[in-house]
Amino acid sequence: MEKKLQDEVLSRRTFAIISHPDAGKTTLTEKLLLFGGAIRDAGTVKAKKTGKFATSDWMEIEKQRGISVTSSVMQFDYDGFRVNILDTPGHQDFSEDTYRTLTAVDSAVMIIDSAKGIEEQTLKLFKVCRMRGIPIFTFINKLDRQGKAPLELLAELEEVMGIESYPMNWPIGMGKEFLGIYDRFYNRIEQFRVDDDKKYIPLNEDGEIEGDHPLKISGLYDQTLEEIMLLNEAGNEFSPERLRDGSVTPVFFGSALTTFGVQTFLETYLKFAPSPQPRNSTDGEIDPLSESFSGFIFKIQANMNPAHRDRIAFLRICSGKFERGMTVNLPRAGKSIKLTQSTQFMADDRSTVDEAVSGDIIGLYDPGTYQIGDTLTVGKDNFQFERLPQFTPELFVRVSAKNVMKQKHFQKGIQQLVQEGAIQLFKTVKTDDYYLGAVGQLQFEVFEHRMRNEYNTEVIMERLGSKITRWVDGETVDENLSSSRSILVRDRFDKYAFLFENDFALRWFTDKNPSVKLYNPMDQH
Ligand code: GDP
């Protein structure tokens, strides 16, 4: 690959922000885009976040989806880097697509609300990053408010997530008494709410302020020095290797709302975040610096408007260079396709993309050609990237056709939507019922809507609530173990799984049946 192109690839940093709703993802994204000059006013990203979501109203879904399209990928340049931020929709928009987005990034930034600590959705997304071996950076937000003690937050990271933490900086007080951060990496103190020329105080070799300084009078300064000493002596070790293999997460403290600690975070992040990484394929690892173009589709966004059946397929480029109008192979279908319509996603609007390289994400207009997980290659290349992982569904419905005369349409619709990755299908072993599994309620709504509009079939969906899915390790299982609290099903690859009523039912089952080996694909790393 020519040097100029190599440099372009090496300048890419592609990440997703993982967080629980309200931790500050939108605010932080906005501030990062402001630094990158991609938007002029704070509020641009915020304005795209819609208010209430009416589940029955598909216009609302469309609006929501349309909005997620434009803000799905945001790109900006900073200090010689090109940064791609991928959105991970949360709230009612949470779906398997949220998880799949994490297959298209090289690192993740986890935001934690300092008052709340680790929350449910953050933990779920964290597990997917773990499973994928994605390096994780942590930003502890809202230090301008009273929150949990920093040491307590670090202990939570270790206990709940099982990851070591390395604070790159450390808060000096918090809430009303928040004075700033002690920056271990840059060996300086960054003061909160002071004039720009006073913002940074350099530290001497011992990590202390030289001479007199008003900050030294505060008891918080001494307390911080003590805590730093403790971290230096008893804290975890940081190295780029430990970050990359997922043993340690560098932790940053700040306040996105007041734009405090954000630039320091960004600059340190860029120093350590990996450039586009190689990906496994049927031809072995594909080097992001190799000449010929390749990529994979990690998400397909259906247009919910029945008048427009077109969809957008999101492609992560894994090698070579994309040029508009190029002809690519779709090895799964043995087809070749000319890519004339491509879209790049920006904070403000969509624009046509003519060129993109490894690490970049582009949208391809999809008249129904692509499936999630599809590989695109060029020339003689016919390899396929590793299959995308299976995510563990948590919500279930029993589904059937309203009109028995429409069985054929029903079957066709279900098979296609399942294959496309919109939803997961299970069949009960005893009764041959169809169960649909999802990670978010939205997936059922999209399914119902698309069955009606694309396959002309009304469906009946009976809520079964949440269940714990555990796959059976092995080809056989005693079918009599199926009960109402541990329902035995087969997935679309015919693998056995149990759907447990709750934690208790799972534990009871494993105690009684030690010979049945169960696993959760999302616990494996
Ligand atoms: P998201 O749901 O994760 O995208 O969260 P938002 O960015 O929308 O933030 C949720 C709420 O927290 C909003 O009211 C923000 O103004 C507020 N918020 C975000 N960051 C901070 C912060 O650093 N300090 C304080 N006090 N509030 C914040």
Image (cartoon, rainbow, N blue to C red):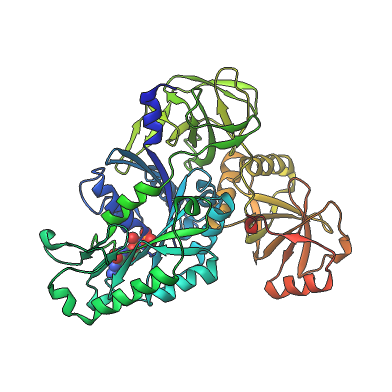
Nearest the viewer among 158 and 447 is 158
- With 131 as the anchor, is 234 left or right in this view? left
Q: Quadrant of ligand 1?
A: bottom left
List x then y, in percent, for residue 271: 35, 47
List x then y, in percent, for residue 182: 27, 66
Nearest the viewer among 167 and 9 is 167
Residue 23 occupies quadrant? bottom left
State the residue at coordinates (32%, 44%): 347
Give the quarter of the figure containing the N terminus: top left
Which residue reaches farthest bottom?
Answer: 219
Residue 497 occupies quadrant? bottom right
- With 365 as the anchor, is 188 left or right in this view? left
State the residue at coordinates (88%, 61%): 478
List x then y, in percent, for residue 304: 48, 43
Residue 451 occupies quadrant? top right
Residue 388 shows in this picture: yes
Q: On screen, 213 above or below 318?
A: below
